[in-house]
Image (cartoon, rainbow, N blue to C red):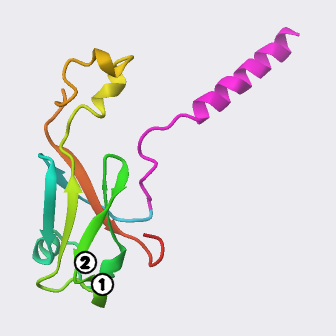
């Protein structure tokens, strides 16, 4: 009886441990990502020249499939000039970004009410956002 109870307990602990999330579920490991720092909340614009200088393959990527990720989620964006599928000289990407507040630090407290300052991260004032592209129809 003890062995059965021990086996059932071990199985349940294994299922519980396997169900935990780590926050990196948004990453698709068959893609390449470029990261860039964000320090303040606001609307940001990235032009095609900046992307090209960073090594982003603007000539081979369909502009309609560009994706930006921040805070473990895909961020809505606006791409000027995506109609032709290519990022040309005057084309740009605009998106809204939140700064690095204590959203990730909040897991250190048992309740958010116990946080000393929910608007400032204890680790860093900068958060990394990521840009990539996906196949047509997947974005």
Q: Split into 4 quadrants, where in the image is the N terminus?
A: top right
Q: Is residue 60 left or right of residue 139?
A: left
Is 129 situated above or below 47?
above
Q: For the image shown, how many numbered marks are present on the structure?
A: 2
124 or 10, which lies in front? 124
Do tag 2 and tag 1 residues touch (Cβ < 8 Å)? Answer: yes
Residue 60 numbered tag: 1
Residue furthest to the top in view is 2
Q: Quadrant of residue 9?
A: top right
Is 11 situated above or below 22?
above
Q: Quadrant of residue 8?
A: top right
Residue at image x 26%, y 19%?
Answer: 115
Residue 122 colored in magenta in the image? no
Residue 7 colored in magenta in the image? yes
Is 61 situated above or below 131?
below
Span colored in magenta: 1-29
Residue furthest to the right in view is 1
Residue marked by disc 2: 57
Percent coordinates x, y for residue 76 in the rendering: 31, 62
Residue at image x 53%, y 34%?
Answer: 20
Disc 2 from disc 1: Cα separation: 6 Å
Residue 86 numbered tag: none
Percent coordinates x, y for residue 134 in the rendering: 41, 71
């Amino acid at each position: 009886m003890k062995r059965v109870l021990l086996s059932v307990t071990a199985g349940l602990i294994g299922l519980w441990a396997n169900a935990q999330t780590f926050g990196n579920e948004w990453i698709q490991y068959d893609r390449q990502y470029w990261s860039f720092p964000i320090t303040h909340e606001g609307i940001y614009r990235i032009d095609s020249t900046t992307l090209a200088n960073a090594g982003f393959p603007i000539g081979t990527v369909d502009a309609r499939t560009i994706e930006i990720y921040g805070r473990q989620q895909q961020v809505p964006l606006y791409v000027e000039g995506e109609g032709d599928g290519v990022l040309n000289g005057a084309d740009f990407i605009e998106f809204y970004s939140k700064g690095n507040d204590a959203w990730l630090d909040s897991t250190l407290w048992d309740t958010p009410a116990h946080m000393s300052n929910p608007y400032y991260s204890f680790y860093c004032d900068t958060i990394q956002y990521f840009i990539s592209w996906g196949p047509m129809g997947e974005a």
